[in-house]
Amino acid sequence: MFYREAGDFSTTYPQDSQTFPIRFDRWRYYAVLFVAIFVIPFMINDYWVNSIFMPFLIYAIAAIGLNILVGYCGQVSLGTGGFMAVGAYACYKLMTAFPEVSMFIHVLLAGGITAMVGVLFGLPSLRIKGFYLAVATLAAQFFLVWMFNKVSWFYNYSASGQINAPERDTFGILITGPNTEAWATYLFCLIFTIFSAVVARNLTRGSVGRQWMAIRDMDIAAEIIGVNPLRAKLTAFAVSSFFVGISGALFFAVYLGAVEVGEAFGITKSFLVLFMIIIGGLGSIFGSFAGAAFLVLLPVLLKIIGVDWLGWPTDIVAHLNLVIVGGLIVVFLIAEPHGLAQLWRVAKEKLRLWPFPH
Amino acid sequence: MPEQLAFTIEVFLNGLMAGVLYALVALGFVLIYKASGIFNFAQGVMALFAAMTLYGIMNGQVPFAHLINAIFGTEIHYFGWEVPALAAILLTVVVMVLLAWMVQRFIFRHLVGQEPIILFMATIGLAYFLEGVGDLMWGSDIKTLEVGLPQGINETIDEVTFGWFGYGFFIDNLDIVASIVAIVLVAALVAFSQYTKQGRAMRAVADDHQAALSVGVSLNFIWILVWSLAGFVALVAGIMWGAKSGVQFSLSLIALKALPVLMLGGFTSIPGAIIGGLIIGVGEKLFEFLIGQPYLGGATENWFAYMLALIFLVFRPQGLFGEKIIERV
């Protein structure tokens, strides 16, 4: 009734190729943006930011990054944790080396450095594919974590081997360190999340994205019709690692504040982000958000229900969490291999015909 | 420098033993991959689960005791009996067969014909599920498995090598037992797949699913059989690793080490898994001893195997013994 393209005429090419062609979608998008920018910052406190919003926003960036590589370009990677660590350590080195520069620049530069490392570890993808590549990216995961543990230059020779985010600001507002305001850190992450989503969405709609998808669907056929696999795969690795690096930098500097590399960026982190995009939907930006929201909220919900209401010990709830996440992955792969994003698409199709489906 | 040489030989031998254990885990992967094309990421967690179950049965733990206590407010932990090791192993085999049936019935029957990467991700989900269930069932504390395997330094080798080099080698008895068990297991598996009816059916399925179906091989049965065999191999690996370093979560990470072993050896080859395991085991120990410890600050064992496999794959993508990959549009 209200969700339809009838009566919505495009008179120019830009209008015709806009991201949300249906008016309802467009307004919904503006409404979400409005709430996220102008309403939520005034309503939240530290608890909400630290346990829900910040992990959600940061993981969403990581999921978008991984989704570009796995969902759009078809190159399975298990090295996300390692690349996040690169972003975090790059950000740390920049923060301590150039204290007066704005945090925005540090985070973006950290993303750029991670992109370069990503290209380096993406090089073998030109020769190997599928599972073999997945295992090859494990080399990145373990090697990078080991390197950040052993080479003390990366953690400025601190005795504990940890990195701690010093107090840094942007436009005079504190972003990192112990004395930040909830709304400031939230908005800082939100800006990067919106930026990542918009950039990723538009990249995947354009010629680069089509090259990625051609490589994903069949690399040999794509090569025959003129897609350069070297360029397509390496750009996918670069863009993906860029986003993952940004999320790693935010994860360390803004969210945790202090990081021990093996603990924060271990192999489980790689799997967590991979699960997000499987549950959310491979090859979908919305799916990255949905998956991140789902896997951030699930442990919080379980903790509230299990520990606070039923009074169970926390370790049981943690184990139940594993069981549920594992079970859900299997259920999703069986029932809906395209994840939450596909459910959303189906709902939209239904909505277009509603209330007269014939 | 005979001292240095003796050290190197000792490291080499220890690497060989570790390699055998890697190969043992890798073997489970190869079995399932050959018969069903599924890359079973859960193999390591299966080993962990098997070892936990064995420990639980031996000590008469009540399954899900912690959960039951939390829900009903009771205080039960043990049945109060102890099962001898051999009987417990048999019971664990039954559990693993049951697990194989459930995996086949509830997961992979619904995923027939899906892309390999979807199946792979399903096994990652299975790994998490199984890990959670294992912890809920038997508790997540570190357990020491005592099934009566000999442990400690082998005195004979120590004395003999002392006579040769003036320096006694430290070789763990457990490693020797593990090597013998692995060799027997491989021989048994090869014999099984070559000389028995089920083994032939298994190879037929591995060769071509549809052709095997058309001559009357039950795919369902074969897959359950293969998962049971993988479960059995996981149990053996779990016992060995559990006796060596305790039954704990890190056991399942050893499965990750088996991946580069497989990539070196090729996914479809049983001898490949063995030789790949030996190369990785020896390679990482020697690298750590000769280069890692003196120059790089140690702990290179964490990544050496993956890097070796990565570099190796760039030159030979199908592994040492894998079938040549031919791609068609």
Image (cartoon, helix red, strand yellow):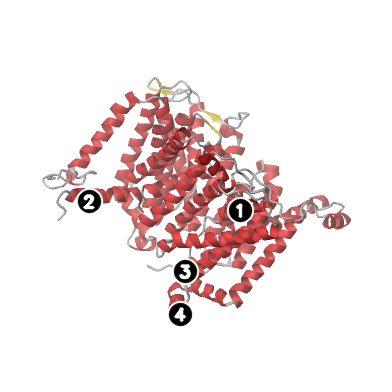
The vertical placement of A45 against B29, above or below, is: above
Q: Amino acid at mark 2?
A: Glu
**In the depicted view, which residue is nearer to us: B323 or A280?**
A280
For disc 3, the marked residue is B220
Q: Residue at x 15, y 47 (%)?
A: A5
**Element at label 2:** helix
Coordinates of residue A315 in the picture (x, y in percent): 54, 39
Q: Mark 4 and mark 1: span between their CA atoms?
A: 38 Å
Judged by depth in the image, the label closer to the viewer, 2 or 1, is: 1
| Residue B120: image location, x then y, percent | 47, 57
Q: Indicate which label's residue lies in the foreground, 3 or 2.
A: 3
Amino acid type, residue under disc 1 in the picture: Thr
The residue nearer to you, when weighing B108 against B288, is B108
Relative to residue A117, is residue A76 depicted above or below? below
Label 3 marks which chain's residue? B
Q: What label does residue B53 carry, if any?
A: 1
- From the viewer's side, name the closer residue of A85 and A22: A22
Judge depth for marks 4 and 3 and give the one in front: 3
Is residue B7 rendered to the left or right of residue A301? right
Image coordinates of residue B272 in percent, x first then y, are 60, 65
What residue would you read off at disc 4?
A: B215
| Residue A302 or residue B188, whichever sits in front | A302
Q: Which residue in the structure is indicated by mark 2? A: A349
> Do the residues at discs 2 and 1 belong to one chain?
no
- Marks 4 and 3: same chain? yes
Q: Residues within 10 Å of mark 1 (few under 14, many from 20)?
A: many
Label 4 with label 1: CB-CB less than 8 Å: no
| Quadrant in the rendering for residue B258 | bottom right
Count the numbered circles shown.
Answer: 4
